[in-house]
Image: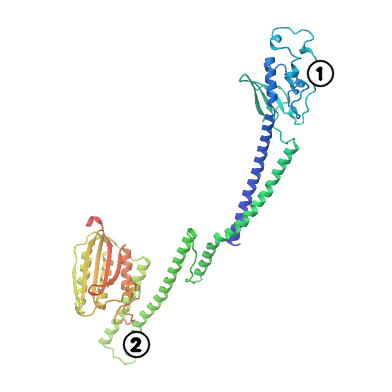
Amino acid sequence: MGIITKMVLVFLATNILLVGAMAVAMRLNFQKGFNDYLTETEMARLDNTVADLSNAYRREGSWEFVRRNHRLWSRFLPSDNAHIAGESGSPVDSLRPLYPPAPARLGAQLPSGSARERPLRRLPPPPDDQTGLSARLRLLDAGKNYLIGPPDVRGNAALRAIELDDEIVGWLSLTPITVPTSSLDRSFRDEQLSAVYPIAIGALLLSLLIGIPLGRYLLRPVKALATGAHSLTQGDFKTRLDIQRRDELGQLAEDFNVLAKTLQQNELLRRQGMADVSHELRTPLALLQGEIEAMQDGIRPVDQNQLSKLHNSNTQLSRLVDDLYDLALTDAGALNYRKESLDLAEVIQQSAEAADYRLSQAGLTLQHRIPSLPGVSGDARRLRQVFDNLLKNSRRYTDAGGEVRISAWRDDSWVCIRIEDSAPAVAEENLPHLFDRFYRAEGSRNRAFGGAGLGLAICRNIVDAHQGQISARESTLGGLQVDIRLPGTDSAR
């Protein structure tokens, strides 16, 4: 199963859960909101009931007239065909001939045959109750104590205050209905609820129609990266990705291209290095083998001169092996460095004095005037190796009668060393490659003229290990100029 299929499945599962949760939440929320709407509608229908009860309380002075009088209580319930309570109009109007005014009722005996003793059968019949209010509406006193009506078994009743002269004298408690009684309400509710699931399915299908192409678009760079990485593992280092994006995937593609380019260069260097090492080792070995076979066949005499030639070839071969070993150590960062604070002028002076004799034998003049350069943290032996290699290159490649010059100075927190020589110069196109291994500017593989091309590569690795910089350019003397910058301490300035 590919990553695109997995992402689509994850996207689909997430959408199913999300849309399902939204559908259930919408259904529950609509049901609750619709029930609240029905409750508010019914509470609004109780306006006349509240007014009638308030007027009755004003006339009677308490709720005793309606306590346990269910037939009378039913007359206060709103009717479906407007509040028709007989010909007199409202329950209070129909009660007026039944009850004397409050002052006459308070403190005086009612005469026999008074309105209170008249049978209730003279009242008009209770209104029709198609909404079930008689089973859901109850009357509470000001302290919310039950007076009359069905008990509240659910405990979720809505309350409506009954006020008289800005004072609450009672409460109407209404239990909400769970099923609408009106056919229009039921039709509206069923229509809205039945539309939730088709909408959810449509949203899910729409998300798939958008999500599948979008997922393919988003994962296209990932797939390209996976294909490119597979090509790299197969050794195809020419692989490059053409992903023009400005997000993390675009940055990853750029890093991939840099990695592929680096691997390609390293592979070329490895192959070239193997060929160069084979060539560099083959020359002295072939020379040794030829000389030894000539002596064995009696072509050359075994004398001091021939032994000296064999010794020189062996020495040359040993130096090459040592250079290869040092280069491998510096490339791996495993070369042992013993850094300490030193005066770099002393190291340069030692190297110049050691090279002065060989330079003079080659017909070259060495000029150096080095000021004191304390405060450099480095390995004196390895830095001496850098200066020795540079002076050896000047001796090999500078024409007789020329000049080699060493200068040094401090530039802010850097210590700068310059070694330059006279003609011949190095071609400008060769300057960037001088520090590559097995590279020689004269283009010849003749070891009698130059070395193996490892000295400058070793110098670069040693300088890099000291967090320094090394570069080459054309010298003002007509030859090659090598500049070295090493970090120094500010306290030594």
At numbered mark 1, what does the secondary structure look like: helix, strand or loop? helix
At numbered mark 2, what does the secondary structure look like: helix, strand or loop? helix
Which dot marks residue 62?
none
Residue 162 figure quarter: top right
x, y (%) of residue 47?
68, 26
Residue 482 figure quarter: bottom left
Report the front residue among 385 and 485.
Answer: 485
Q: Could you tell whether 412 is left or right of 436 in the image?
A: left
Q: Quadrant of the N terminus?
A: bottom right
Disc 1 residue crowd, few under 14, some 14–19, many 20+, Cα 10 Å = few
Which dot marks residue 290?
2
| Sequence-first disc among 2 and 1 | 1
x, y (%) of residue 405?
21, 71
x, y (%) of residue 474?
27, 73
Q: Say which amino acid is labelled 2.
A: Gly
Disc 2 residue crowd, few under 14, some 14–19, many 20+, Cα 10 Å = few
The residue at which mark 1 appears reads as: 121
Q: Quadrant of the C terminus?
A: bottom left
Report the front residue among 190 and 44.
Answer: 44
Q: Nearer the viewer, mark 2 or mark 1?
A: 1
